[in-house]
Image (cartoon, rainbow, N blue to C red):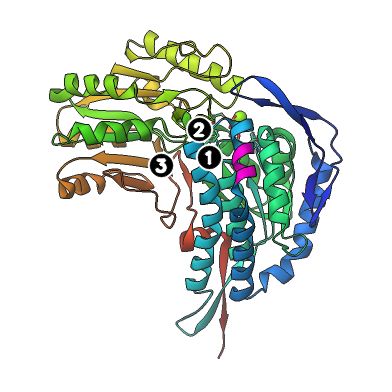
Amino acid sequence: MRSIEHIYINGEFVVPCGEDRLDLINPATEEKIGDVRLGNEDDVKAAVAAAKRALPSLASSTKAERIDMLHSLRDTIAAKPDELVRTMTEEYGAPSYFTAFSVQNAASIFDVMAEAVAAYEFDRLVGKSAIRMLPRGVLAAITPWNSNFGFIATKLAHAIGSGSPLVIKPAEQSALQTEVFARRLHQAGLPSGVLNIVNGTGPIVGAALTNHPDVATISFTGSTQAAKIIQRAAIDGMKRVILELGGKAPTIIMQDADLDQAIPIALMSGFANSGQACVAGTRILAPRSRMTEVSEKLRVEIENLKVGDPQDPQVRIGPLASHAQWERIQTYIRLGVEEGATLLTGGTGRPTGLEKGWFARPTIFTGVTNNMRIAREEIFGPVLCLIAYDDEEEAVEISNDSEYGLQAYVLGSDQSRALRVAERLLAGRVIVNGAPHDPRAPFGGFKQSGIGREIGAYGLDGMLEPRAILTP
Ligand code: NAI
Ligand code: MG
């Protein structure tokens, strides 16, 4: 049992003004493992004031100084991964293959930003004008629970890279992870006020940040629903919002795909992060002529995806992050059946042998049409839809017929043909034939998946605004 009693303001761990508490639960056991004292509006005021004081000096820092800070952050995160991995497993329940990646990735995010800063042209000459890319001001970030370390690292990397002090409100149910991460970040020795972390709920701390007049930019990752509240609130303060939201990614299995290769990739993309991933490939599109073959292969391969204790290295799917998420998934599985889809595998309830913990049964629906709600809405759990298409044209059409446009996957033997299809998809990222993670690729979506991009120069552009000086 651990009680999180502090937030991080102006380079110090301080007791928040807020007095509400939230229980922290291990999702694999449903046991209470701690609680957190939540911040309130006064804590947001103190944090934003600290960030504002840090602005002039951070805004005028050199590339070399920013790169030094980013390297220190990388080093402190990379130094002892075990404690981070352990806390993420305990509080979030991600399987070990994913926690190991997450921690290593969080460190590499700082490195990638350091490279981007080195290459970025903060000073430019356009016509006769001298341009300097200036930070817009204090950056506020609000992040979710499905990859807490990665989100904090990404927002902080953009803050330092652009010279914008940060106030971040991580997901309240990730407070243990935030605490171990913050203690580590503190060791990087950033100037006071450059990083401020306030635990709290969306409607209280999130809203106070969104409404604060001294916040210039808001970087939000989470649900499309919360993003709309934030974006509306941002209008009065004329804040820029960068939004990384949900998805309903298509995975197109091409007519010529080798199913021995394609199906395991499709399943791992669909069930990534136990299905709690905005980038998850949750609509599998397969040629109608190969439907029986594809279904059969899916049924066989899903047996290889072990569900259970996230500490078991064989496990690929852990519990859902919370009871609310578990209920949400059950509701969608019932909805799929009501809508007339057929369960190829899975269904409601817990997998056999897992009586405790928020484990859902990995579920695949067949006979899904793209107008069903299970094909249109983000479910955010291990539930996939198999949709038939007649020809390539229709595969592209179904893929793009979505409110979302975050990520897409194409799997086919003829790579150039797969590439031609990839070029017709409206998504922030298109992954061809299981290409590995590229930490330098811009990230973000079209349509309801968001506004703006993160990573590298694309990420910096969103935090900066040009000032032109014209001389006679
Ligand atoms: P959420 O969008 O409500 O939470 C994300 C963050 O936003 C948290 O820090 C939360 O405290 C904050 N927040 C919530 N309401 C806010 C408000 N009014 N003002 C300011 N900040 C606010 O996501 P939630 O409710 O935890 O999950 C619900 C669904 O959202 C999921 O099932 C999934 O479909 C989607 N989601 C998508 C994510 C993604 O990576 N794109 C991440 C988390 C959720
Ligand atoms: Mg919510």
In the rendered image, which quarter contains the N terminus?
Answer: top right
How far apart, in angstroms, are the residues tagged by discs 2 and 3?
A: 24 Å
- Name the amino acid, label 2: Pro
Q: Upstream in the sequence, badge 3 or badge 1?
A: 1
Verify whether residue 444 appears in magenta.
Answer: no
> Label 1: which residue?
99
In x, y percent, where is residue 374? 39, 21
- Name the amino acid, label 1: Thr
Taking depth in this image into account, of 78 and 161 the one nearest to the observer is: 78
Say what secondary structure mark 3 lies in. Answer: loop
How far apart, in angstroms, are the residues tagged by discs 3 and 1?
A: 23 Å
Q: Residue at x 34, y 19 (%)?
A: 364
The answer to whether the residue labelled 2 contacts the one labelled 1, judged by CB atoms less than 8 Å apart, is: yes
> Label 3: which residue?
406
Q: Categorize mark 3 by other alpha carbons within 10 Å: few (<14), some (14-19), many (20+).
A: many
Q: Quadrant of ligand 2?
A: top right
Taking depth in this image into account, of 468 and 342 the one nearest to the observer is: 342
Label ID, residue 241: none
- In the displayed structure, 32 sits above or below 120; it is above
Label ID, residue 95: 2
Q: Which contiguous range is marked in magenta?
A: 82-86
